Structure formats: C-alpha cells, structure tokens
Image: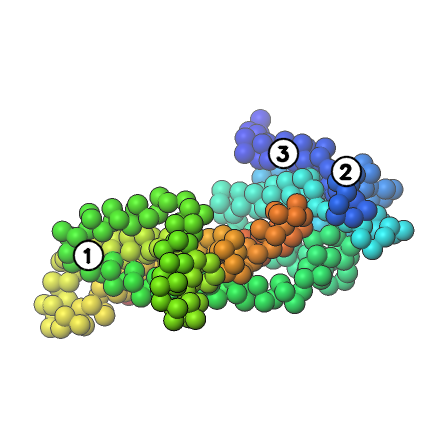
C-alpha cells in the first residue's frame, strides 16, 4: 500500500480550505467594504473543468509524488487566470471606480502552489524541473499582465494610477539600501577582520552590536529623532546637508546600525575559522603576509562573508520600508499611506515589490555563494 505523505496531505487540505474562502472582494469604490466573490460565483460552464482538474492533481499528489510539480503548475495557472477572468466580468457595467481586490483564497492557493514546488525540489531533488515550473508561472503571469487580462484587478489599477511615483519610490528604496550597505561594508568588513586578530575586543564589541540589534526597528528610528534634530538645530550647516530628525539621513543611520551585526559577525567568523596550519603552509611556500591574506585568507573566508552580505542586503531591503514612516521615501511610503487610508491595494503596491526585491537579491547571492564554494573546492 502506498504511503500517504503528511506534508502534501496538509497542503492538499489547505487547498480544500482555500477554495471555500473568497477569491475576490468587489466594491463600487474604495470607501465601501464590498461583496465577497467565491469560487462558485466565479466559475461558469466549462470554467469548472480546469479548476476541478487542478484540484484533482493536488489531491493525487498526496499519493503520487510525481504529480506534485504538475499540480503546483496547474493550481497557480488556474488561480491567476481565474482572477483575471472574474475581475473582467465584474468590471463590465460597473463604474470606473469599481475595485476587484485580491482576497484570501488567491493568496492561500498561490502560497500552496509555491510550497508544493519547494517540496518537490527539496525532497524529490527536482531542482531543474522546479525552476522551470516557477519560470512557467512567472511567464504566464507576465502574459496575463501584458494582455490586459488583469487590468481590472484593483492592484494593477492602483499601479497605473501611481506609475510615475512608483518608479521614483522604487529608485529611492534602492538608493537607501545601496548607500546604507556601502557604509555598513566600510565599517563591517574592517571591524570583523580586526576582531579576528584581537580576541580581547570580541566580547565587548559583540555585546554593543547585540544591544543595538535587539532594539525594535521603529524604536530605533524614534531614538535617533531627538538627537539628530538637536544636532541640526545646534549646527544649521548640518540641516542643509539633510541631517535632521526625519528624512534620509536618520533612515540611513538606522539601517547601518541595524545591519552592522550580521556583517561583522560573519566576517569575524570567516577569518577566525581559517586553520592556522593553512597559513603556516602558505608562509612555508615563501608567501609574504600580503600574499597569504590575498591568496589564502580571502578566498577561504569569501563564502561565509557572502552569507553575511546576503543577510545584510535582505534585512536592509525589508527595513527600508520602515524608513518611509520618517519621510525617507521608498516603497514603504505606499505601505504606510495605505495603512493610514485603509487601502490594502496601496499597502500591497509597496509590500509586493519589496518582497520580490528581497527574494531576487537572496537568490542572486545564493547563486554567487554556490559558485565561490564550488570554485574553492576545485582549487
């Protein structure tokens, strides 16, 4: 008798729960709470066929693991297509201010599809097939967006309304992350390397960095407000350079303080963990101290350092959202504005690109770490 996989059984159960939840929320405008649209309201005639087929594939993957990727692919595509089709139908005859907002069933089903792909990659070793499945879902979503099938979904309408501002805030978000990372790199790499040579300074240095890290991000922004405002008042020249209680400067300072610990810790661990015998062997071959550092220390430490860079960048991209609260701009501006106006589409307009940006950077650095690790093993 074939053994039922508990993880896939749980995901199948989640899918069954999700199809009972609202797919969309349709309202005549942003001020009204609107009406929930369920799957039974969205599907008509032959549209039931692909939806039922996807559901059967998900249930079948519980007992037949080979169906998992197909189930994930079918589930994601049916959900994406059905949202566009249903929102188009709802928009017909409705006013220009009508809004079809993505609801809980959409998010939960998309999450289940992603988890099914991850599960197939990790446990069945189908990394290449999983990448192709993810790419197929992304391309399908891009086709739907380009063809205008999703043009009546409120999130897309909100994007078109804010298109020019969105581009500016995205650039500002990336600028905040880039500047803060450059400063963290200038401080963190030398400090981590220095600590690996000065053991007496390790405990007090990490104690200070740990204390900073334990301060909640919003509280850290608030703590910087008063001293920086006082500094700008005492020295007016500083305020002309942007130093003040609110704005870009306190946001960058907070991001630097918050992301310093992972970079210093990883740099310290990377250099401290190098075997002394390896250095001794390099010196025995006639290498100078500079050559040992360049040709032995740095290549061996690089994978761990890149791991720290990965953590810092992902953290900075996420924390930069909070910077929008103190007038530093970035994608967080949409998030806080949306929360203030109870406009979930605005919140998503800031949150979704932030998540995608963090995932892209994470994947890029993970790939870079794999490349350097492979190169080191072959060296």
Where, by quadrant of the figure, is residue 332 drawn? bottom right
Measured Cα–Cα span from mark 2 to mark 1: 59 Å
- x, y (%) of residue 228? 38, 58
83 vs 327, nearest the viewer: 327
Compared with 245, 186 (above or below) is below
Q: Mark 3 or mark 2, which is nearer to you? A: 2
Q: Quadrant of the N terminus?
A: top right
- Along the horizontal axis of the image, is 364 left or right of 356? left
Label 3: which residue?
14
Residue projecting furthest to the top: 1
Measured Cα–Cα span from mark 1 to mark 3: 48 Å
Residue found 57% across the figure and 56% down from its top: 333
- Along the horizontal axis of the image, is 32 left or right of 16? right
308 vs 99, nearest the viewer: 99
Measured Cα–Cα span from mark 3 to mark 2: 20 Å
Compared with 328, 206 (above or below) is above
Q: Which of pointers 2 and 1 lies earlier in the amino acid sequence?
A: 2
Residue found 40% across the figure and 58% down from its top: 229
Q: Quadrant of the C terminus?
A: bottom left
Label 1: which residue?
196
Where, by quadrant of the figure, is residue 64 drawn? top right
Q: Residues within 10 Å of mark 3 (few under 14, many from 20)?
A: some
Q: Is residue 270 visible?
A: no
Q: Which of pointers 1 and 3 lies earlier in the amino acid sequence?
A: 3
Q: Which label is found at residue 36?
A: 2
Residue found 85% across the figure and 52% down from its top: 95
- x, y (%) of residue 54? 71, 42
Residue found 39% across the figure and 50% down from its top: 223
Q: Mark 1 or mark 3, which is nearer to you? A: 1
Q: Residues within 10 Å of mark 2 (few under 14, many from 20)?
A: some
- x, y (%) of residue 266? 30, 54
Q: Mark 2 or mark 1, which is nearer to you? A: 2
């Amino acid at each position: 008798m074939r053994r039922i996989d508990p993880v896939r059984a749980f995901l199948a159960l989640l899918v069954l729960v999700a199809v009972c939840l609202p797919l969309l929320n349709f309202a005549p405008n942003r001020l009204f709470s609107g009406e929930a649209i369920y799957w039974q309201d969205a599907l008509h005639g032959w549209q039931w066929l692909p939806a039922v087929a996807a559901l059967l594939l998900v249930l079948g993957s519980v007992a037949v693991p080979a169906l998992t990727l197909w189930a994930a692919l079918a589930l994601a595509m049916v959900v994406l297509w059905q949202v566009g089709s249903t929102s188009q139908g709802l928009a017909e005859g409705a006013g220009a201010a009508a809004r079809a907002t993505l609801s809980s069933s959409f998010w939960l089903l998309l999450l289940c599809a992603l988890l099914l792909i991850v599960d197939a990659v990790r446990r069945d070793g189908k990394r290449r097939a999983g990448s192709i499945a993810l790419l197929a879902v992304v391309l399908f979503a891009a086709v739907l967006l380009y063809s205008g099938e999703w043009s009546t979904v409120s999130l897309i309408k909100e994007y078109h309304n804010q298109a020019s501002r969105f581009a500016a805030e995205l650039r500002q978000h990336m600028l905040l992350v880039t500047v803060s990372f450059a400063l963290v790199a200038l401080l963190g790499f030398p400090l981590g390397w220095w600590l690996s040579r000065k053991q007496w300074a390790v405990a007090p240095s990490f104690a200070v960095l740990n204390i900073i890290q334990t301060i909640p991000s919003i509280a850290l922004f608030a703590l910087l407000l008063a001293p920086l405002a006082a500094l700008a008042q005492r020295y007016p020249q500083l305020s002309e350079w942007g130093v003040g209680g609110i704005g870009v400067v306190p946001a960058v300072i907070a991001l630097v303080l918050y992301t310093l610990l992972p970079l210093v810790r990883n740099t310290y661990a990377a250099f401290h963990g190098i075997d002394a015998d390896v250095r001794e062997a390099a010196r025995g071959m006639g290498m100078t101290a500079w050559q040992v550092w360049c040709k032995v220390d740095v290549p061996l430490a690089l994978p761990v350092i890149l791991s720290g860079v990965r953590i810092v960048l992902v953290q900075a991209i996420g924390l930069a959202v909070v910077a929008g609260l103190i007038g530093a701009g970035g994608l967080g501006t949409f998030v806080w504005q949306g929360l203030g106006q109870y406009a979930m589409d605005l919140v998503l307009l800031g949150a979704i690109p932030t998540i995608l940006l963090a995932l892209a950077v994470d994947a890029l650095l993970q790939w870079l770490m794999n490349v350097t690790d492979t190169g080191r093993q072959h060296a």
